[in-house]
Image (cartoon, rainbow, N blue to C red):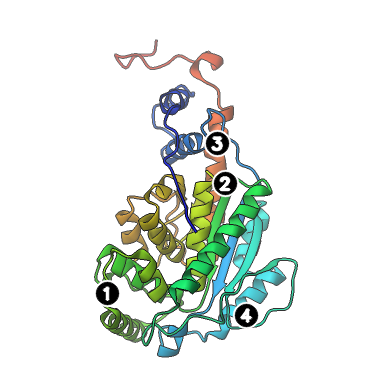
Amino acid sequence: MEFNITLPNQALKDALVHKINQKTKPLGALGLLESVALQIGLIQNTLSPQLSNPTLMVFAGDHGVVEAGVSPYPQAVTAQMVLNFLRGGAAINVFARQHNMQLRVVDAGVNHVFEDHPDLIHAKVDFGTGNFLIEPAMTLQQCAQAMAAGAALVESEINAGSNVLGFGEMGIGNTSSASCLMSVLCNIPIEQCVGRGTGFDDAGLAKKTAILKQALAKHQLKNDDAMQVLATFGGFEVAMMVGAMMAAAQNKAVLLIDGFIATSALLVASRLQPHILQYCVFAHCSGEAGHRQLLAYLQAKPLLDAGLRLGEGTGAVLAYPLVQAAVNFLNEMASFESAGVSEKSDTGEPC
């Protein structure tokens, strides 16, 4: 499995900047929306970008490290929440319906046998990962299998007409996975990466931090082999997201990046294919402790900062209307010339 993600074509950059600046507004007055409009125009190599068939992919998987006590919720909640997705009752279902986004639920490695369902994609690598406090979460072969599966799923969506994909996840214990990925790959102490996850109190947070510190000490990995770090501490849903994100960027789609776990998957992908970051719109800054620092590490500017920490791709879906707004103002907003509105002169006086 090989990926080759190139930088977006920069040939239209000056023309896009000129088009944005000529809209009937003060320079920079639409803030991050202007940056997003420019970014999507470059990704699509056009002055009139279009968003089609927006799709949110939720990857679900279980984590063996949960048996060590890193979550206040039992592992069974992962499968229960997947069933909730399939019944249409979760927050992601509500928001996806509201914003007309297609929702794909993917069993990447849940410790449960699901019956066939029209909204469920069976892509299970195994019934959950190993306990990385004792052993690597998965083999390198399993890691590659998960990444290839994620890439294939995205290829199908793009072939069906989607050019904007959001990424979400479900997996009890996956904030522990994300914290370890961040700590190793960013060389940041684990204490600065660990958060309360699904709701630990202070004592639970201290216990979780101690367990993850012990796991990092056991494996003693360096940050120069992202695949090995992913196989050691990742989840099947995280590895599948890595492959899915890289396939999306390789096909020059727009990537909507959700919260802490999705951003940790992107962190891995960016070590494998650095140019992937140019295709990413960061939906929000999570309330999970390490996410703000991880976004800063990636030099990312999120669209929202609303204290969200649910996962599921909820932040990506909630931010999508802003992405639509960025494209729409670029395509539909009048220019100074077309509207007959005077521009600001060099002296600051209307001309």
Task: Quickly name the residue at label 3.
Answer: 327
- Give the Cα distance between marks 4 and 2: 29 Å
- Sequence-first tag of 4 and 2: 4
Q: Residue at x 61, y 79 (%)?
A: 79
Mark 2, secondary structure of its residue: helix
Residue 80 — which label? 4
Report the amino acid beneath label 1.
Glu
Residue found at the very far top of the displayed protein: 351
Task: Quickly name the residue at label 1.
Answer: 191
With 55 as the anchor, is 25 left or right in this view? left
Mark 3, secondary structure of its residue: helix
- Give the Cα distance between marks 3 and 4: 37 Å
Q: Residue at x 71, y 71 (%)?
A: 87
Camera-nearest label, 2 or 3: 3
Report the amino acid beneath label 4.
Gln
Q: Residues within 10 Å of mark 1 (few under 14, many from 20)?
A: some
- Give the Cα distance between marks 1 and 4: 30 Å
Report the amino acid beneath label 3.
Val
Q: Is residue 311 visible?
A: no
Task: Quickly name the residue at label 2.
Answer: 321
Mark 1, secondary structure of its residue: helix
- Sequence-first tag of 1 and 2: 1
| Mark 3 and mark 1 residues within 8 Å of each other at the beta carbon | no
- Give the Cα distance between marks 2 and 3: 10 Å
- Give the Cα distance between marks 1 and 2: 35 Å
